[in-house]
Amino acid sequence: MTTELGIAVVNGIFVGSVYSLVALGIVLIYRASGVFNFAQAEFGTTGLFVAYVGVELWNWPYWLGLLFGLAGAVAMGLATERLVINPLRNASRVTLLVGTAGVALAAIGIQFWQSNEQPIRQMPKLVDGVAFQPFGAAITYQHLITFAVLIVVALALAVFFRSPSGLAIQAAQQEGTAAELVGISVRRVSMMTWGIAALLGGLAGVLSGPNLSFTAGHLTFGAGAALLPGFMAAVLGGMRSMPGALFGGLLVGVIEQFGNLSIFGYMSGGGEMMLFFFLLIVLLLRPQGLFVRKAVAA
Amino acid sequence: MTDTIPEAPEESTRELPPVVAEQIDDEVEDAAPFRPSVRGWVARGLVWALLAWVVFALPGNFLSPFQLGVSDVGHASKAAIFAIIGLSLNVLIGYTGTISLGHQAFVGVGAFVSAYVVVDMGLEFWVAVPIAAAVGGIQAALLGAVSLRLTGLYFALVTLAYGLFAEETLFGITAFTGGEGGKNVPRPLGFEDDFAFYYLCLAFLAAVLWVDWRLMRSKGGRALQALRENPRVASSYGINVKAYTLMAFVVSGIFASIGGALLAQQSTFIVPETFNFQLALIFILMTVVGGLRNRVGVVIGSVVFALLEEGTLVHLLHLDGILDSTIGLPAEFFGLVIGPILLLLTITLYPGGIGQQVAPIAQWLRGKKLDLHAGKVTEVEVNDVRA
């Protein structure tokens, strides 16, 4: 039992680091545009596909392919902001949500279309092999790299939000009109936020992609689905807290792994069951999130 | 300074615009309403007849120069079923402003319950549909009772989690759904034929449309409209916001389950993977593109998306060759690529969706003047959800 729990926790933390990356992007966009961004995970899948094209089809060096993938994700994020979010800036939140869902579905459609000849693909790992095996859970170098990237990203974001650009983003998020009055271009800030969020999504995609073979919609509803766990992580952090989203992602990863314990008799979909009931309980008992003291007026 | 102070009271005691004036205006319009000429009536009658022919005669190969095959009429049945599902989502998103991202679960519950009743319990289809509808209503009531304390985006998130939970966990129970292998579902007696089954779907669609229409004319329907506009004001007028939202949720669940039961019979073979998150997104797309709170629009939108899904529409219009040769887009991906783009165009340019675009024609068909600006209401926008 202890070994099993140990495996669940270790696996959960490493799976959860992908969720954290997705959740960070979701929180960033929620603070900027007040929308639940359903395209966040799709930034990742798009980045993964673009990186795959660079590395596997065009035989570029791996690092160049990764950069290419991240650039693809950022380009998609910026295009989303320009073509969908900006025209709808005065629309209601439901309309915005449907808009981002439309972006996700359009991306998935294009991926299905372009990967028609070979629907299932496999991205090579950054570094092959298993690093160590606590409790018998195989932790690959790819997992370790993902976790390290998450830590670096979290630190970088913390530093960035103290810099002038980061402060401008925070100001525009809190009060757009007042930010314009002191000379901050809300438009540029919105672009920047979406760009950073898309970069985070892209990182989640290119880092988690090599763990499994991938198809279109890999991070949205495919094998590496990170959209719902990402949202849950963001909700645990009260939708506005970046550290909350980070720890929320790790926690959600662990909770999801608990669904695979043998006490559930290896039923199918145990992880989804755990997630659903965990989300219900959290939202009903502490709708403001686990990691915040006081609800922030939305 | 002395000038400005006396002015203020004047502002506040300004008379409200007389309410009577508006009523007089209406009466004047009523006094001399527009009546189409004889030619106008003939033209309208012809269009009505054409519509009726397309809906009733064309799929059954009556009075029709085209000989439609079994697969074509199968698509028509699917379109009618999608229209039922679209109306079910319209009750939720359109009437209450609550968004459900787990509607594929509702449809799936209807499909699997109906299949279970028919296959494992050996009962008739006519018993299975009410049971499926009841189970769909009960699961909606349970989920709603627990989670409607949450509103807006948080509620949407719960439905999203519920959808995945149902897809993976509930539909994964082999004894109930047949697991990965899926389940064969026989058609009801007398409707084994695809053509007869189409008319059955059409009858169910008509029934759902009628119930939806009557519901919106009832006290509950007016309460829903009021609470969508502003829940706080509505509750101050004595409307029990939560109870009515729950009612709408249950009605939506019942409609969706009926659609699911028909879907199971239509495809005669169902697997749990059919009811995935992508399907839920397509349901939302077709409802919003159709036009919220507009029954005609929702039905048209659902039909278009049902036909787009497997490229049927492209085949029917003989466009597949052109698309394949110009941009290399195979017909089966047409819906997946074009559908979301249609959605984005709709919500940015025509927030009223297809319902808004066809409003002039619909008005004209009802015997009014052809007014190109009909349907341009500003209130088609969904009110802000309360997140």
Image: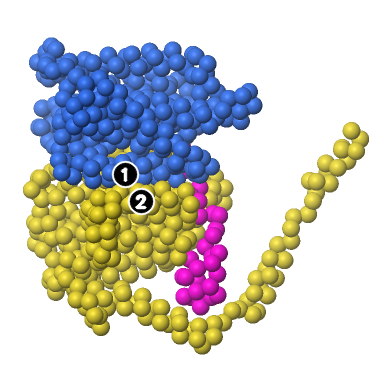
Chain colours: A blue, B yellow
Chain letter for mark 2, please.
B
Q: Secondary structure at mark 1?
A: helix
Residue placed most toward the observer, A83 or B8:
A83
- Main SS type for the magenta part? loop
Residue B374 sits in which quadrant? bottom right
Q: Residue at x 61, y 30 (%)?
A: A177
Compared to residue A185, the image places residue B357 above or below, namely below
> Residues at badges 1 and 2 in contact (C-beta under 8 Å)?
yes
Extreme-right residue of the structure? B2
Q: Secondary structure at mark 2?
A: helix
Q: Horizontal and vertical percent for residue A53?
A: 22, 32
Compared to residue B162, the image places residue B136 above or below, namely below
Q: Residue at x 31, y 17 (%)?
A: A150
- Numbered range of the magenta stretch: B359-387
Q: Residues within 10 Å of mark 1 (few under 14, many from 20)?
A: many
Q: Which mark is residue B285?
A: 2
Q: Is residue B294 left or right of residue A185?
A: left
Q: Residues within 10 Å of mark 2 (few under 14, many from 20)?
A: many
Residue B6 sits in which quadrant? top right
Q: Residue at x 80, y 46 (%)?
A: B11
